[in-house]
Image: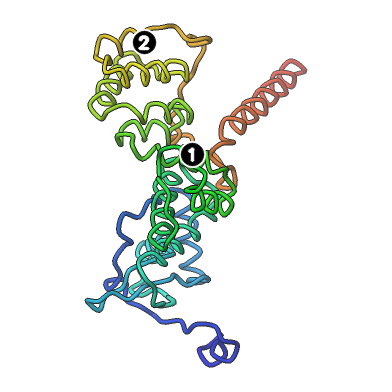
Amino acid sequence: MNDTERKEIKLPRIYDIPLSEIDDFPDHPFKVKLDEDMDQLVQSIKERGIITPVTLRPKEDGRYEIVSGHRRKKACELAGFDTVKAEVREMTRDEAIILMVESNLQRSVILPSEKAFSYKMRLEAMNRQGQRTDLTSVPVAQKSTSRELLGKEVGESQDQVRRYIRLTELIPELLDLVDEGRIAFRPAVELSYLQKEEQGALLEQIAYADATPSLAQAIKLKRFSQDGKLNNEVIESIMSEEKPNQREKINIKYAEARRFIPASIPYEKTGEYILKALEYYHRYQERQKSRNDAR
């Protein structure tokens, strides 16, 4: 479709913008990974070009800021292109934030950290547009409008939105463990109430013990922190408590497992997918054994 045809049906004009003139979105919460999905996107762009143009916002210095399409822009760079097809739209900072979050939440796999920071950015933008609410503490009824609206838009309860935003209070190293699936979501929310130095001390204990807190342990750590009594000795004591099935627990880094899991499988279904894969592999081994025995 050329520009004349697009104008006739009132679609925005598409430009070829040099990649060298495009800046990333400030504090972009979604990761652009050089993984198998990116390899496939690069190959697709080499063969067919950009199917869906990226969305850019003009900056005061004459450059452009990418609002939607960070992965497509990176894929164009990797494919050796100098330009990218783009729709250029005038929009405010808050309008750009809302569009950026909306477009990225359509992805099939979204990490907890990505939800956490994108929900926070989106809610702050909504608040600046006139709907005020606190981001991390339980609100009174009359202040829940923005979070309630955001929850409906992303398919989460407003309490779940609050829990995700709490994750932004974790130090990066602990948040990485949440993304990897080593720390479960609800314990992570409780740990977000610890002071930063307390989180650092906990991280050292996690590395030493090669174990992460259960929900009960996380609640206990939070309680000691709020009472001003959480120190290294208390952290070590709580973390040394044996959890149910602790000895049988197996830790698999999410980032390492991700390359074997289809992009269509959402993060929260990863464990279920791995179990099904193991069941399939077990049946395969049994069939192979039966064939060998029949020879």
Label 2 crowding class (10 Å Cα cut-off): few <14, some 14-19, many 20+?
some
Residue at (36% x, 73% y) in the render: 57
In the rendered image, residue 82, in percent from the top left (x then y), is placed at: 33, 73
Q: Is residue 219 above or below residue 47?
A: above
Question: Which quadrant of the rendered structure holds the N terminus?
Answer: bottom right
Going from N to C along the chain, the mark reached first, 1 or 2, is 2
Q: Mark 2 is on which residue type? A: Ile
The residue to which callout 1 is attached is 258
**Image quarter of residue 224:** top left
Q: Amino acid at mark 1?
A: Arg
Label 2 belongs to which residue? Answer: 238
Provide the secondary structure element on which disc 2 rests: helix
| Residue 153 left/right relative to 203 | right
Q: Height in image: 178 above or below 75? A: above
In the foreground, 149 or 53: 149
Is 169 left, or right, of 36 in this rendering? left
In the picture provided, is 90 more to the left or to the right than 269?
left
- Choose between 276 and 54: the one closer to the eye: 54
Left or right of residue 239: residue 39: right
> What residue is shown at x 35% (from left), y 55% (from top)?
28
Colour mapping used in the image: rainbow
